[in-house]
Amino acid sequence: MRIEMVCPAAEDSAHLRSLAVATLASLTPDDVELSLRDDIVRRLDPATDLDYGADLAAITVSTKTALRAYELAAAYRQHGVKVVMGGIHPSAVPDEALEHCDAVVVGEAEGLWEQVVADARRGALQRLYRHSAWPDFSHPPRPKRDIFPSRGYMPVQTVQTSRGCPFVCDFCSVTPFMGRTVRRRDPEDVAREVATLGRGWVMFADDNIVGYGEASRALFRALRPVRRTWFGQASLQGIKDDETLRLMFASGCRSLFVGFESVSRGTLVACGKRQNDPRDYIDAVHRLHDHGISVWASFVFGFDEDTPDVFEATVEVARKAGVIMASFCILTPYPGTPLHTRLKQEGRLFEDRWWLHERRDGYPFFRPKGMSTEQLFEGWQQTWKSFYSGSSLLDRFRHAPRTSFFATMAFLPLNIFQRRLTAEKIIGGNRFFVRDSAAHTSAPRA
């Protein structure tokens, strides 16, 4: 039996190895012949790059790659190849996905993929596969990373230590996909996996690596002897404890991506992100920097409470806090989220299934309340332009923390890249800037 794993890509997909694909590979019986087609490394041509002799094509789909995934699925099915889809997007809209494939795995693959393979072997694929309860995650299968070619990716290995999120942010798709109960891996199991990885950085794909008290500290203690440099994502929950931050730095953490989301407390309460308080932002960033951990901040525009003055206020907070980098996003109504449901009910979506339509890059998919659509779009552009202006960049560099080698050495290269992204993609409209930039630094697929 031959199965082809497929990674579709959007124009801004990062050149990272798919942890989902590596996990599927580890769950596949040894007598199955596996191949990989990765749209991220090199854009696939359906006429020449797909294996139409495969018995099954398995496509991992996010919302931003859905349109491309459906295009690739159509090519396989036109040649008689059965297609199964999984991932966060088909899990949110399985009926839609089934319009484009033969089977959908809803939710996490462990405990389901084995049945998919067995059914495909005997020509009896079911339409839907789903769990009756959340799978145990204390000792998950070790991802089979040798399915990837040796070249064409960033020097980063992705590891996951937990699934689920206890918070109920109405714009986030994590809780509908993975549940509100946090399921954690055994810390020693995580450390053993990290110890097997090659050179380069480790990226923890958890939505919040630091917010769980003693459980987080136990993970950091287990990682410390491995001596690997890593970065991850975090909410503000948990970073007020100095002992936790000391352990995190000692375990190898040098940078965190932090979702601040808004500088308005009212906005945060309304969208369900009550754990954030803008009064704590500057102190939180300084605390992390004092412990040698750089902060990449993320902010979102377009909440119902936002008015045109939110853009300048956000830049001011980001600059005062001294974050190493910042990303500014327009609120996205992902399917399966309370936000998408509400905007649809209110008739404010331009398209219910916006992910199936090509749109101007960055342009809102809905009508905001506190400003016009054009004001939201132009304010978003101006925020990027202001934060990454030459004067801002130089001023932030002069005041950047010197508490870690990473912060000092990486500041200018990262911010210069972001300045180019602002000029060419955010303002200039080159949707493929990230992909084109990666093509200059990534070798073709081996």
Image: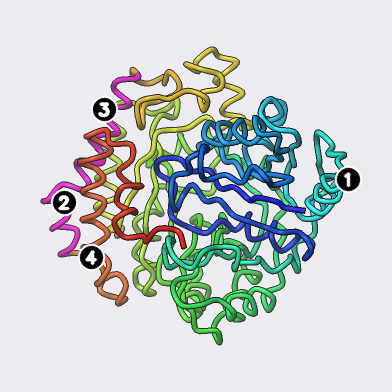
How far across and how far down the image is residue 245, in percent?
A: 48, 73
Please name the residue that numbered disc 4 is placed on.
400
Furthest-top residue in this view: 347
In the rendered structure, which segment of residues is drawn in magenta? 373-398
Residue drawn 59% across and 79% down? Answer: 196
| Whole-number angstrom distance, CA of label 4 to CA of label 3 | 28 Å
Amino acid type, callout 3: Glu
| Whole-number angstrom distance, CA of label 4 to CA of label 1 | 60 Å
Please name the residue that numbered disc 3 is placed on.
378
Residue drawn 36% across and 32% down? Answer: 362
The answer to whether 364 appears left or right of 187 in the picture is left
How far across and how far down the image is residue 249, in percent?
A: 45, 76
Q: Are marks 2 and 1 in contact (CB under 8 Å)?
A: no
How far across and how far down the image is residue 412, in percent?
A: 21, 63
User: Which mark sits nearer the N-terminus, 2 or 1?
Assistant: 1
Q: Nearer the viewer, residue 82 or 131?
A: 82
Mark 3 Cα within 10 Å, few/some/many (few <14, many 20+)? some
Q: Between tags 4 and 1, which lies in front?
A: 1
Residue 269 visible in image? no
Amino acid type, callout 2: Ser
Please name the residue that numbered disc 1 is placed on.
122
User: Which mark sits nearer the N-terminus, 2 or 3?
Assistant: 3
Please name the residue that numbered disc 2 is placed on.
392
SS class, disc 3: helix
Q: What's the mark number on residue 287?
A: none
